[in-house]
Amino acid sequence: MLLPEEAAKSRTVARTKAWCLICFALGLLLTNYPILQIFNQPLNLSGIPLMVVYLLGIWLLGIVVLFILARALAQSSDKD
């Protein structure tokens, strides 16, 4: 039987790994055809096509979210 601290830590690690998988699936969904078609408009933001702004925004958001999740996993493993 796990001690309460170990049980909480394993739940935190499992939850963080689940969020990583959710972010991966969401990234696939947001860069797939039906969603990309919404942003495929002849519109420019500061001279940059809307599609490029969308893709770079999703890319940056994915990096930030996965960085936060990786830090959470590293902190939980450092507590060993």
Image (cartoon, rainbow, N blue to C red):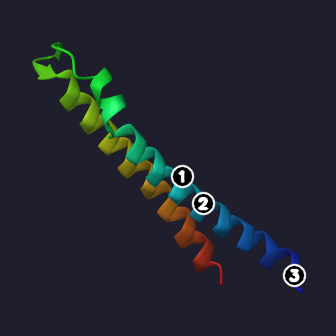
**68 relative to 17 in the view: left or right:** left
Residue at mark 3 to residue at mark 1: CA–CA distance: 28 Å
Amino acid type, mark 2: Ala
Q: Are marks 2 and 1 in contact (CB under 8 Å)?
A: yes
The residue lying furthest to the top in this view is 43
**40 relative to 47 in the view: left or right:** right
Residue 51 location (% of width, % of height):
21, 27
Look at the picture and state if 27 lies above or below 1.
above
Of the 4 image quadrants, the one containing the N terminus is bottom right
Residue at horizontal 30%, vertical 44%?
Answer: 59
Residue at mark 2 to residue at mark 1: CA–CA distance: 6 Å
Amino acid type, mark 1: Ile
The residue lying furthest to the left in this view is 47
Look at the picture and state if 23 lies above or below 11.
above
Q: Residues within 10 Å of mark 1 (few under 14, many from 20)?
A: few
- The label nearer to you, 3 versus 1, is 1
Question: Which label sits on residue 3?
Answer: 3
Please tell me which of labels 2 and 3 falls first in the chain: 3
Q: Are marks 2 and 3 in contact (CB under 8 Å)?
A: no
Residue at mark 2 to residue at mark 3: CA–CA distance: 22 Å
Residue 56 location (% of width, % of height):
25, 38
Residue with the mark numbered 2: 18
Amino acid type, mark 3: Leu
Residue with the mark numbered 1: 22
Residue at horizontal 47%, vertical 50%?
Answer: 25
